[in-house]
Image (cartoon, rainbow, N blue to C red):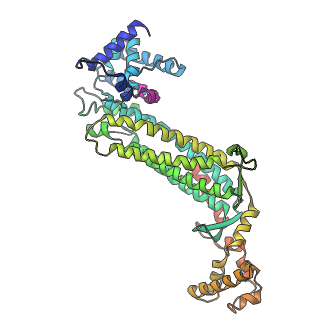
Amino acid sequence: MSQPADNQLANKAQAWSALFSEPMSELVKRYTASVFFDKRLWAADIQGSLAHAEMLKAQGILPAEDHAAIERGMAQIRGEIEAGSFEWKLDLEDVHLNIEARLTELVGIPAKRLHTGRSRNDQVATDVRLWLRGEIDELNTLLSALQLALVEVAEKNAEVILPGFTHLQVAQPVAFGHHLLAYVEMFARDAERLADTRRRVNRLPLGAAALAGTSYPLDRERVAKTLGMQEVCQNSLDAVSDRDFAIEFTAAASLIMVHISRLSEELILWMSQSFGFIDLADRFCTGSSIMPQKKNPDVPELARGKTGRVVGHLMGLITLMKGQPLAYNKDNQEDKEPLFDTVDTLKDTLRIFAEMAGGITVKPEAMERAALKGYATATDLADYLVKKGLAFRDAHEIVAHAVKTAIGMGVDLSALPLAELQKFDARIGDDVFEVLSLRGSLNARNILGGTAPAQVRAQVARHRARLGA
Ligand code: ARG
């Protein structure tokens, strides 16, 4: 580090430490610094500073030459950070002071004017919002890709039958495509939630200064417009202290992970020897160091595990805000790591799942065999009797007897001879066998939202149109 740079830093620290009679202890310095994680906000920090400087110039608060110097310095800093040559310093506490100090090194006095009418409190709130807005946009793209990947597998499997479960007991036959589209619905709602959260993320705190606003004639609307922000935060105290948007985002992220986790659980079950419904491509699995026959679904298992981590971040953030008096408190510095980790975990998970969906091998025979085991068409027999004139409750009772008999004989309902079936109700005719078949059951549920292949195809078309694919 060169001598003049050192002096700059000393001066910088002097700005607030003139009041202090002893230097900060090394431990406290490390404890309070955030630069090692918040340097990630650098691009947003520069973007926010440039918008602020441009407005200061437009308002006649900052001379045009100073503005030009700030732009020049920031361009160089951007280059240094991108090239990895920027020297981040713990002594300068956070991303904001690091960039400002470097700007001062590079352009001198004009850099010292940048902070006019601004505080790190409204600066950091703006940075986090700008950064998160960009991440939400990326997440939205990833969510669409995952939905599309699932829609494609669903389309190929519109006719494949597996047992639908309630209480994890075989209930009724459903199309595998229909089952996958249930997850597409979840992820579609997740995308809606992210879009809604984005509206509240995309508001501008700058101009709130430390907490009370500023005496300079700032044009907040102008800064908002430059930054593409929809609105200006309307109360300075709220502007610097609000982290609702981070909590909301993490809540939306937690729900996405919960959906991923439910899907993971199913993939794990389906891949187990007991089910044997699917296989996952080798590249998403690992072996065992002791059992040579093993192929473990590590990716879905880890995703299920990482759900706990993201939900934990939600708990962390919501607890962080509890009991904080207005306005800014240093507690808020703790918003970043959970937020960053939530975004990273979510992005990786969504990417992997979109890829993994394409690598699912479906085993239709195993699925059908399982569907044939649990008297999955019993409801269809009851419905058949209702169509023949019985009340549903009576039909339900009759079918329970029929199932009991079939269990005793160790066969499916469809394997009972007609004469046997007619003992339960004389109205049962030859046409019952189509009704008792898995495919007959599936095709019969040709209602909006139902599992009939025709409905699955209609939903596939709707999703494709919605996703623009
Ligand atoms: N690093 C701080 C944070 O993340 C920036 C704001 C500091 N403001 C202050 N008054 N100490 O919240």
Where 98 sits versus 407, above or below?
A: above
The residue nearer to you, when weighing 311 against 25, is: 25
Q: In screen coordinates, is 138 left or right of 271?
A: left
Q: Nearer the viewer, residue 50 or 167?
A: 167
Q: Residue furthest top?
A: 3
Please indicate whether residue 142 sits to the left or right of residue 250 in the image. right
Task: Name the residue rendered at 52%, 53% in the picture.
Answer: 258
Q: Check the picture and name the quadrant holding the N terminus.
A: top left
Tell me the quadrant of ligand 1.
top left
Residue 189 at x, y = what percent?
50, 54
Q: Quadrant of residue 416?
A: bottom right
Left or right of 255 on screen, residue 179: right
Please report the bounds of the magenta region as a residue range: 33-46
Expressed as whole percent of the image width and height from the top left, the position of residue 277 reads: 71, 59
Magenta stretch, main secondary structure, is helix
Residue 372 position in % (x across, y down) = 72, 72
Q: Is residue 450 visible?
A: no
| Residue at 41% from the left image edge and 12% from the top image edge | 106
Image: 283 above or below 460: above
Q: Quadrant of residue 351?
A: top right
38 falls in the magenta region: yes
Residue 44: x and y in percent read 43, 29
**Is residue 258 in view?**
yes
- What residue is shown at x 76% (from left), y 63% (from top)? 365
Residue lying farthest front?
A: 290
Residue drawn at (47%, 16%) of the image: 76
Figure check: 453 above or below 255? below
